[in-house]
């Protein structure tokens, strides 16, 4: 664990002493930047200094992104915006398989990055890599997944939502709507955030029966056919609770295929989902603000590395949950078109 009281040593001491000088140093102005972060100011003539004016840093972001899931576009955009502001070269990488994700963290350690932002979808698999980063003196921020595990792993800052509480809120809403049979669709079995969401929905839903359907989001045609078959088999299902926007979009098609009248609700949003909420195909969504998660995960590391700051006082910084439905969708729509909600 890195702490607010530990004095930076070695190259971190030199970094902190050089902050002011770095803003004007020609060598920094000439430094190249990653295509995914640390971009020059719009008014700069090709330099690497972001609007923060601090010394250049390199931060790795490693996620469990599933290819094709637009949720991660929002996370990455937030991270890139923070990197641009902070004069950070952002090295973004991802893999849905936990062992591969851990290897990406180790690669970041080996390349001697200044900080690492990581998701903890499979905490047991990620723990050794996180421990190695902290042992190397590299600060780690966690976000999105691992709400119940980040503190025990020695990570000091976490940005995301309490998935269990978010699920309970969803279940309570389904109860208030008078639903009698909820189908919760988990697109990656064993992923702690998804499992917690469904567990929370089950706790919050008190007006009928509840069941879980496991699907594989790496095979979306199979997801659609599996949901269609389930809805055809059991027409009593009157609510489909999905745990990601792409799965919600597929659920809308499965519902049509099966001739079902079930309501579709979901966790997470994207631009396409905004339109589905507007036209009533999806009743509502729980927004955990992925853009904000990516932004804070990078910005918090910059604050620590340049000024010794931490955020949250040892507690998670919650970015959700918040409901988005037809009553407030217009406020969100413009942000979604910009790719930030």
Image (tube, helix red, strand yellow):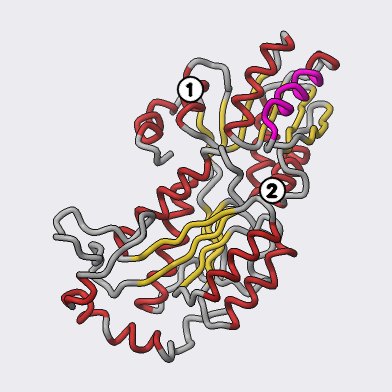
Quadrant position of residue 110: bottom right
Task: Find the residue positioned furthest to the top.
Answer: 259
Quadrant position of residue 254: top right
Count neighbours of disc 1 (C-alpha within 10 A) and say few if under 14, some if 14 to 19, many if 20 or more: some
> To which residue does mark 2 refer?
164
Q: Secondary structure at mark 1?
A: loop
Quadrant where the N terminus is found in the figure: bottom right
**Relative vertical location of residue 161 with respect to residue 175 in this rendering, above or below:** below
x and y, in percent, of residue 186 in the image: 73, 38
Quadrant position of residue 174: top right
> Which residues are the magenta region?
219-230
Residue 289 within the magenta-colored segment of the rendering = no
Quadrant where the C terminus is found in the figure: top left
What residue sits 48% from the left and 57% below the top? 92
> To which residue does mark 1 refer?
326
* 57 to the left or right of 325: left
In this view of the protein, which residue sits in the foreground, 302 or 3? 302
**Relative vertical location of residue 110 with respect to residue 65 in this rendering, above or below:** below
């Amino acid at each position: 664990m890195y702490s607010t009281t530990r004095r930076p040593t070695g190259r971190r001491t030199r970094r902190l002493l050089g902050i002011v000088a770095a803003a004007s140093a020609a060598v920094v102005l000439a430094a190249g930047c990653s295509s995914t972060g640390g971009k020059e100011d719009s008014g700069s003539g090709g330099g690497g200094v972001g609007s923060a004016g601090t010394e250049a840093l390199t931060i790795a972001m490693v996620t469990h992104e599933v290819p094709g899931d637009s949720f991660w576009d929002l996370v990455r955009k937030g991270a890139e915006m923070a990197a641009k502001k902070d004069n950070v070269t952002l090295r973004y990488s991802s893999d849905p398989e936990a062992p591969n994700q851990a290897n990406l963290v180790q690669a970041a350690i080996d390349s001697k990055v200044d900080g690492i932002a990581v998701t903890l979808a499979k905490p047991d698999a990620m723990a050794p890599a996180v421990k190695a980063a902290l042992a190397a003196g590299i600060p780690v921020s966690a976000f999105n997944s691992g709400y119940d595990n980040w503190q025990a792993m020695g990570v000091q800052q976490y940005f995301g939502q309490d998935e269990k509480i978010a699920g309970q809120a969803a279940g309570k809403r389904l109860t208030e709507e008078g639903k009698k049979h909820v189908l919760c669709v988990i697109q990656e079995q064993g992923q702690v955030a998804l499992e917690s969401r469904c567990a929370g929905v089950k706790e919050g839903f008190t007006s009928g029966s509840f069941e879980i359907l496991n699907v594989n989001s790496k095979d979306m045609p199979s997801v659609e056919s599996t949901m269609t078959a389930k809805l055809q088999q059991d027409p009593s299902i009157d609510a489909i609770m999905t745990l990601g926007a792409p799965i919600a979009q597929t659920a809308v098609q499965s519902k049509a295929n099966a001739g079902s009248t079930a309501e579709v609700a979901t966790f997470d949003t994207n631009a396409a989902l905004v339109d589905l909420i507007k036209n009533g195909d999806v009743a509502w969504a729980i927004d955990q603000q992925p853009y904000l998660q990516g932004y804070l995960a990078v910005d918090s590391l910059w604050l620590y590395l340049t000024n010794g700051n931490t955020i949250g006082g040892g507690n998670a910084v919650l970015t959700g949950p918040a409901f988005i439905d037809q009553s407030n969708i217009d406020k969100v729509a413009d942000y979604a078109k910009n790719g930030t909600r």
